[in-house]
Image (spheres, rainbow, N blue to C red):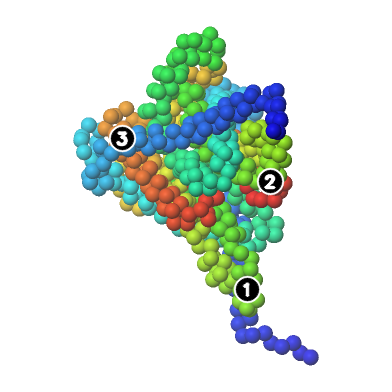
Amino acid sequence: MMEETPLPANYRRRQLVNKAMTVLIYAAVVIAIAPLLFILAEVAYRGAPVLNIAFFTHLPTPVGVPGGGIAPAIVGSFIMVALASAIAIPIGIGAGIYFSEWPEARLSTVSSFTNDVLAEFPSIVVGIFVYVVVVLATGTFSALAGGIALAIIMIPIVARTTEESLKLVPKSLREASMALGVSRWKTIIRIVITTGRAGLFTGILLSIARAAGETAPLLFTALGNTYYSKGLLQPMAALPLLIYQYGVSPFADWQAKAWGAALLLVLTMLALNLAVKLTVGRRFSHIRPEN
Amino acid sequence: MALKKGPSGTGFKLKGDALLKGAVAGAAIFVVVLMAALAYELFVGSGVSIEQFGLGFFSGTVWDPVHNVYGALPYIYGTVLTSALSLLFALPISIGVAVFLVEKLKTRHTEAYLIGTTVELLAAVPSVIYGLWGLFFLSPLLKTYVEKPLHMYLGSVPIFAGTPFGLDFFTAGVILAIMIIPTISAVSRNVLNAVPNSQREAMYSLGATDWEVIWKGILPFARSGLFGATILGLGRAVGETMAVTFVIGNATRISPSLFSAGYTLASAIANQFSESSSPVSTAALVELGLILFFVALAINVFARTLLWRMSRMTKGRI
């Protein structure tokens, strides 16, 4: 019979430490996920009772008058995010193409690094910047200023995801295309972008989701509005602004409406993010949602 | 011999190349110009305040729109305190999540994908919703079950002194922690994934337990990347505005107590900017933004440099 090797003297202690740390690691995961569930539950619980047709279609009523809705905020969010997308998507995709296709250029290194920093920038700073540049220049808070502020938030996200998804396109595809005599610009547009379009789409959706949820850049650019705006050069309401203004107000009815708006916003976020995750799947799982 | 003419369309081909390159390079230049413009405009916008208060702006403790005296120290203090608190809470949890996803689940990719995605969804929740939730749910909860017991048993310690009210530095720190966990854990996860397997194999072959592999083989190797992830999280915490504005209580105050209301740089701007009535107070608020700009710039450049070094070491983008 073989003799059993004696266990090291500290064997039990090491096993115990290992078990204890394993438990702590599991606990960390539970603690990290719990807030998401609490937030979703609370928003659903408090927000659902408020939702009805009038909530989506009516103007707000004065304090104390029951009923009314948040229609101007929904419309305002749509308009400003659309405006921001129109500005940010071409610039973001352009910069992303440059980072991916001319990575050796010095401008690419500098701009790509700047872009990374810009992506993490406090959005309130963007709000002040647009206040100084647009609001003071035009003399009015406006949807235009809000849209520009949101565009500045979106550009780095679109640029980053464009770069990352185009870099996933195999070099051999580019070489094959150019070997057939196709020019570089046609190769980029017809081969590279077409192959990487799922990633581009992901980036655009995520940047829209981010812009739709931003409040800080709108505080002193779009300002908010109780009614529909008559043009892009007027203050405009937005969902996140309304949640803030109603949420910190002392009126129970407004607070309830803030929860209803929060539910609407959270559902939009989840839908956009899950759509991204489910359609493009794990290939782009490195592209993370932004906050 | 004369050179043969190229196939038809060569001229167009070159023109198209130049056009596309010019357009996308223009977009890349725009990004750099945007950053420069941000700094420049904030600098110009805070001109009046810089002129009037100079360096005293950083050490002044009074913020008085009535007498037009402005000092930023209470806001700097609030930002430093809440950010430090949030890192204290978020760091162990985030690293725990990253270790779990990479070292515990190992090759169980589906589970790792699901749990990783769930944690990352936290980053998709808009900050105004964190604020609303913080004000109506988290703040009363912390007040009753954390702050009051801490105050009761440890009230003689200055940081737990004062009356727990729920809307204070402590709640702001907790909500910031929840918000930066997805950032730190996602970047840490990429960092741990980039650690070469030889680190693990060598430890296991010596008979190390799972924890010993993690503690002595993985974490030390990954430390510069993990540090970068932490700094990136710090950047998020410093700049976060709306959630903090809801729960920090909004008071210009420097108090050692965690249960005291306060302000951060960002929340002070958010709360006071639209009420600002004089050019001096607006300039002072813009200068708060300028401070925030340079702090965020320094933090993010530092974090990116650390991550870049780590990815060069392991030859993979993080």
Q: CA distance from mark 1 to mark 2?
A: 33 Å
Residue A46 falls in image quadrant: top left
Q: Nearer the viewer, mark 3 or mark 2?
A: 2
Residue A19 falls in image quadrant: top right
Which residue corresponds to mark 3?
A45
Callouts 3 and 1 close, C-beta under 8 Å = no
Using residue B169 as the reference point, say whether residue B132 is left or right of it: left
Callouts 1 and 2 close, C-beta under 8 Å = no
Which kind of residue does numbered mark 3 sit on?
Tyr
> Residue farthest to the top?
B156
Using residue A137 as the reference point, say whether residue B316 is left or right of it: right
Which kind of residue does numbered mark 1 sit on?
Ala
Q: Which mark is residue A51?
A: none
> Residue farthest to the bottom?
B1
The x, y position of residue A142, in whole percent, is: 41, 47
Nearer-the-camera pick, B235 or B271: B235
Q: Are marks 1 and 2 on the same chain?
A: no
Sort mark 3 into few (<14), some (14-19) or many (20+) by Cα contacts within 10 Å. Answer: some
Q: Nearer the viewer, mark 1 or mark 2?
A: 2
Using residue A75 as the reference point, say whether residue A206 is left or right of it: right
Q: Which mark is residue A176?
A: 1
Q: Chain of mark 2?
A: B
Sort mark 2 into few (<14), some (14-19) or many (20+) by Cα contacts within 10 Å. Answer: few
Q: Which mark is residue B196?
A: 2
